[in-house]
């Protein structure tokens, strides 16, 4: 559109007094100039809209006549500052021709001449529209809003920003009390009625109280991520977590934070809080149904498998018994027929071999055929497995944490099968903690590399494993659970060993059990040092 419209001889250089006046009149805000005696010397056309009077009439008036006594008195401190030569910005209300007082953002900018201060420019920008939008949202009944006051952390925030996000992440990781102290110094600047009723608070009484009182320890990872996003200069942050009602009941919520932008108060953060309790409960019920179903399916398959094994093995067993009987009969004869005895025993051995072949075939069937090996990042596999079981773990009242070593070399394995191993170990850990001692129920999945082997460790804070149980854990059908199958660990061991790895159980430093398994890293990956370590 603009192409070709280069300034020709008939377009005057923009900048004459008339041009500038036309421009000032086009601005949808109050623009004016007052001299050092506070007499208006210029007012743009927008004054007609605001004050209902032509701007020419306003020129020559004292500021007191513009604003009325009340407005004028409230401007005192700002006028003193601009008259001292300082540029001043502030928010205030301004009388409007419609009889209301409007919220406005105001700026006074001093203008100096050779003899000193000539006066000052005034810009008054109507913020009522924005304020109105904001308030109708904030005061609405739909979403709970909290306005957080971080003013007591102003110095800390400045320092954190200067040091950068990575440093903050390291601090949070090494100082477990950091987030707690942070929310302990954050206060509620305001909250709407919806938030008050959601948290069971009295709105008036809650203003000025500590935000940390609404944050249980389980919310700390999300609060830490929130803080990292803020310090990292993001515009906002969104995540699901648990908060605390005033009566101590947990509250499942989706948090949406809006961080201050440039030019806004840096010590205020807005938090939208949506109650997702009903949805989470429904999800849990579904997850429970899913696991019940999966369990039922497993029982069914195992039942079928058992029936067919029994059927196939029954024939050779019957033959073994029959031939054993026959051998005895030949032996008990007055003159034992040793040739017949030998023939019967040979058949016994043959049938026995047949039975064990059937077992071997069934076992191979359970592990072979479906394996698909590929190179993949073990951490990604663990994260996927964790995503699959997180809900089930939560519904057992436990928390799942990952502690993954960065840049692990890829392994060559069947990803789905190893995922199954991780899931088995995590679910076992969460189930074990149902009987465990009081206190935090925590499952930690850690990864690392030791001597050319990727090692995955699943530790818990449950009751641990009795010494007598250790040698039997990985046997098929060993279980201490009422509805257990005792197949999980045995299948896990089969999977890991078919990958040339190992699996073992022991006591965890946290007091519960720790199960670890190792999968050897293929040679070339070992040399390159990691999934991204292309190089040599
Ligand atoms: P199931 O879960 O059906 O019992 P598994 O083979 O997965 O079968 O587990 C066998 C047994 O090992 C469990 O019944 C339990 O006694 C024990 N076990 C497994 N994991 C743990 C753990 N994290 N803490 C304590 N005991 C465990």
Image (cartoon, grey):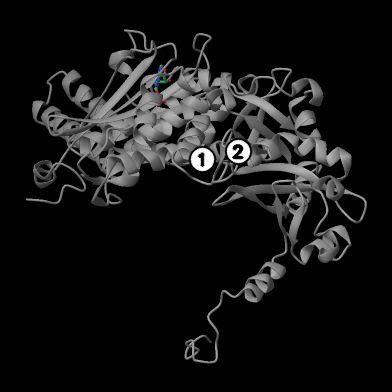
Q: Residue furthest front?
A: 115
At which x and y percent is residue 57? 86, 63
- Mark 2 vs mark 1: which is more N-terminal? 2
The crowding category of the residue bearing disc 1, from other C-alpha atoms within 10 Å (few below 14, some 14 to 19, many at least 20), is few
At which x and y percent is residue 186? 59, 24
> 47 and 182: which one is in front?
47
**Left or right of 416, for residue 47:** right
The crowding category of the residue bearing disc 2, from other C-alpha atoms within 10 Å (few below 14, some 14 to 19, many at least 20), is few
Label 1 element class:
helix
Q: In which quadrant of the rendered view does residue 248 lie?
A: top right
Q: In the rendering, which numbered label is found on residue 265? A: 2
User: Visible in this render: residue 119?
Assistant: yes
User: Visible in this render: residue 487?
Assistant: no
Asked if labels 1 and 2 touch by Cβ distance under 8 angstroms, the answer is no
Q: In which quadrant of the rendered view does residue 445 lie?
A: top left
- Residue at 75 percent of width and 22 percent of height: 206
**Left or right of 491, for residue 140:** right
Label 2 element class:
loop
Report the image quarter containing ligand 1. Answer: top left
Queried on whether the Cβ of the residue with tag 2 lies below 8 angstroms from ligand 1, the answer reads no
Q: Residue furthest right?
A: 99
At which x and y percent is residue 12? 55, 84
> 272 and 10: which one is in front?
10
Q: Considering only vertical position in the picture, is 381 above or below 123?
A: above
Q: Considering only vertical position in the picture, is 475 above or below 23?
A: above
Cα distance in 3D space between marks 2 and 1:
53 Å
**Left or right of 201, for residue 393:** left
Q: Which residue position is annotated with label 1?
A: 294
């Amino acid at each position: 559109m603009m192409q070709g419209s280069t300034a020709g001889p008939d377009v005057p250089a923009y900048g004459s007094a008339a041009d500038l006046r036309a421009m000032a009149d086009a601005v949808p805000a109050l623009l004016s100039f007052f001299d050092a005696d506070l007499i208006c010397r210029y007012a743009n056309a927008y004054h007609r809209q605001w004050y209902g009077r032509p701007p020419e009439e306003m020129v020559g008036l004292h500021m007191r006549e513009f604003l009325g006594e009340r407005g004028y008195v409230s401007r005192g401190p700002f006028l003193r500052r601009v008259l001292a030569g300082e540029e001043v910005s502030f928010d205030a209300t301004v009388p409007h021709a419609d009889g209301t007082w409007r919220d406005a953002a105001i700026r006074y900018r001093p203008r100096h001449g050779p003899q000193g201060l000539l006066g000052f420019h005034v810009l008054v920008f109507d913020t009522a529209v924005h304020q109105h939008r904001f308030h109708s949202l904030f005061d609405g009944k739909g979403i709970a809003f909290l306005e957080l006051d971080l003013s007591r952390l102003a110095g800390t925030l400045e320092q954190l920003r200067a040091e950068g996000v990575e440093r903050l992440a390291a601090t949070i990781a090494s100082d477990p009390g950091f987030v707690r102290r942070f929310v302990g110094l954050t206060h509620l600047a305001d909250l709407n009625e919806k938030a008050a009723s959601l948290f069971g608070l009295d709105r008036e009484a809650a203003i000025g109280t500590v935000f940390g009182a609404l944050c249980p320890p389980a919310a700390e990872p999300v609060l830490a991520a929130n803080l990292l996003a803020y310090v990292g200069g993001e515009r906002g942050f969104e995540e699901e977590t648990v908060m605390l009602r005033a009566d101590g009941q947990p509250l499942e919520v989706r948090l949406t934070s809006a961080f201050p932008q440039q030019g806004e108060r840096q010590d205020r953060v807005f938090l939208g809080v949506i109650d997702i309790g009903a949805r989470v409960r429904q999800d849990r019920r579904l997850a429970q149904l899913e696991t019940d179903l999966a369990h039922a399916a497993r029982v069914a398959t195992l039942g079928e498998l058992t029936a067919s094994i029994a059927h196939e093995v029954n024939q050779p067993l019957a033959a073994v018994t029959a031939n054993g009987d026959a051998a005895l009969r030949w032996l008990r004869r007055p003159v034992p027929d040793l040739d017949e005895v030998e023939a019967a025993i040979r058949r016994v051995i043959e049938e026995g071999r047949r039975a064990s072949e059937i077992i071997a075939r069934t076992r191979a069937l359970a592990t072979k055929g479906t394996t698909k090996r590929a190179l993949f990042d073990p951490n990604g596999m663990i994260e996927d497995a964790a995503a699959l079981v997180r809900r089930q773990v939560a519904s057992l009242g436990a928390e799942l944490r990952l502690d993954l070593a960065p840049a692990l070399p890829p392994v060559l394995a069947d990803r789905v099968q190893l995922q199954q191993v991780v899931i088995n170990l995590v679910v076992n850990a969460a189930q074990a903690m149902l009987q465990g001692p009081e206190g935090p129920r925590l499952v930690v999945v850690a990864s690392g590399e030791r001597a050319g082997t990727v090692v995955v460790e699943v530790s818990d804070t449950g009751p641990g494993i009795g010494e007598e149980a250790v040698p039997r854990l990985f046997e098929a059908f060993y279980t201490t659970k009422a509805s257990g199958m005792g197949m999980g660990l045995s299948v896990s061991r089969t999977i890991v060993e078919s990958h040339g790895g190992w699996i073992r159980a022991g006591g965890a430093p946290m007091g519960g059990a720790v199960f670890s398994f190792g999968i050897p890293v293929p040679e070339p990956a070992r040399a390159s040092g990691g999934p991204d370590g292309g190089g040599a």
